[in-house]
Amino acid sequence: ISYDYTTTGHWENLASSNGSLPSHRHENAYVQCGDKFYLIGGRGTKSTGIYDPISKTWSTGAPPPIWLHHFQAVELNGLIY
């Protein structure tokens, strides 16, 4: 999902270039770090979703070592906290 500020002024679904999708989750965090976006947490130990806006694809990273939910991730100096 992306927000188009320039033309439509509303949220719209954007397809990834290869059909990849993030896993469904709730009570999670979504943060930009470098040139990628990270979808972390969401009840259980779901793998980290990594979105590359250049290639418009999702990939899968490692799961967190503990359940993460009801939190907000932030980036500082190239690290996610």
Image (tube, helix red, strand yellow):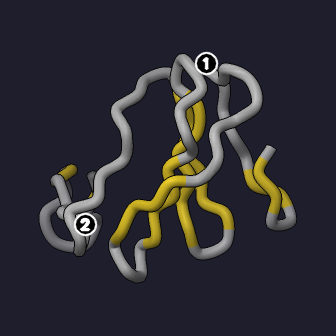
14 left or right, relative to 52? left
* Residue at x 40%, y 61% (from the top left corner): 58
Badge 2 crowding class, 10 Å Cα cut-off, few under 14, some 14 to 19, many 20 or more, is some
Q: Position of residue 24 (x, y in %)?
A: 34, 32
Q: Quadrant of residue 35?
A: bottom right
Question: Measured from the top left, where is residue 77 in percent x and y?
Answer: 86, 65
Q: Reading the chain from its start, which is encountered first: label 2 or label 1?
A: 2
Please state which of residues 12 and 24 is positioned toward the viewer in this rendering: 24
- At label 2, the amino acid type is Ser
- Residue reaching furthest to the bottom: 54
Query: Residue 34, position in %: x, y?
Result: 67, 72
Callout 2 secondary element: loop
Q: Which of 40 and 74 is in front in this view?
A: 40
User: Going by the picture, which residue comes out furthest to the right?
Assistant: 77
Element type where label 1 sits in the image: loop
- Dot 1 crowding, Cα within 10 Å, few <14, some 14–19, many 20+: few
Quickly name the residue at label 2: 16
Which numbered circle lies on residue 37?
none
Residue name at image x 73 percent, y 46 percent: 74
Q: How far apart are marks 2 and 1 (CA)?
A: 27 Å
Q: Which residue is drawn at 41% across and 28% down?
A: 25
Q: Which amino acid does label 1 sit on?
A: His
Residue linked to disc 1: 70
Quarter of the image containing the C terminus? top right
Residue 38 location in percent, x, y? 56, 53
